[in-house]
Amino acid sequence: MADPRELILARLVEIAEAVEGIKKARRNVTGESETTLPLAVILDGDETADDRDPVSRPPTAPRIVTMTPEIYVIVAKAAADVGTQVNLMRSRFINAIAADAQLIALTKDREGGRYEGAASGLSRGRTMIGEVGLSFSFRYVLKPGSI
């Protein structure tokens, strides 16, 4: 059986590659040139096991895990347009993740991804560089001994 965490992360990259306007999607790679923008970067992020699982369970008992990968969308536009472009890409990612049947099927009880919020940043270059980090959480069932 495949590791659900890896399957979710791989699917996020595939979703990112299909989002309208994204030139390139990368996993755990940063530092692309301005010519590759708009760019999506998926960072593996953290995960935590559900504290409500009884301690007395056998080590191979299934655990509910919540993973929180980081999704960054980086765009380059004129200063007057960069905020609008960042918000447009944000909405496209939220919609794409919410509607993806394959991703939903990988999560516990078909819950899909839960949008947790976003953090934005701007920097100067030849044009304004805008970035939005999107936070999603994905719950899945980890079955030790079968991943």
Image (spheres, grey):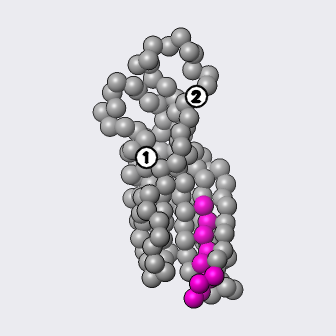
Q: Which residues are magenta?
A: 124-133
- The answer to whether residue 141 shows anywhere in this view is yes
- Residue 65's label in the rendered image is none
Q: Which residue is mark 1?
A: 8
Q: Position of residue 107 (x, y in %)?
A: 48, 39
Picture coordinates of residue 112 (x, y %)? 52, 44
Furthest residue in direction left, as rendered: 1
**Marks 1 and 2, how far apart in space?**
18 Å
Q: Is residue 131 magenta?
A: yes
For the residue marked with disc 1, what is the amino acid?
Answer: Ile
For label 2, the residue is: 50
In this rendering, the answer to whether 73 lies above or below 28 is: below
The quarter of the rendered structure image containing the C terminus is top left
At numbered mark 1, what does the secondary structure look like: helix, strand or loop? helix
- Mark yes or no: residue 21 visible: no
Magenta stretch mostly in which secondary structure?
strand
Q: Nearer the viewer, residue 78 or 30?
A: 30
Which is more N-terminal, label 2 or label 1? 1
* Label 2 environment density (alpha carbons within 10 Å; few <14, some 14–19, many ≥20): few
Residue at 69% of width from left, 86% of height from top? Answer: 80
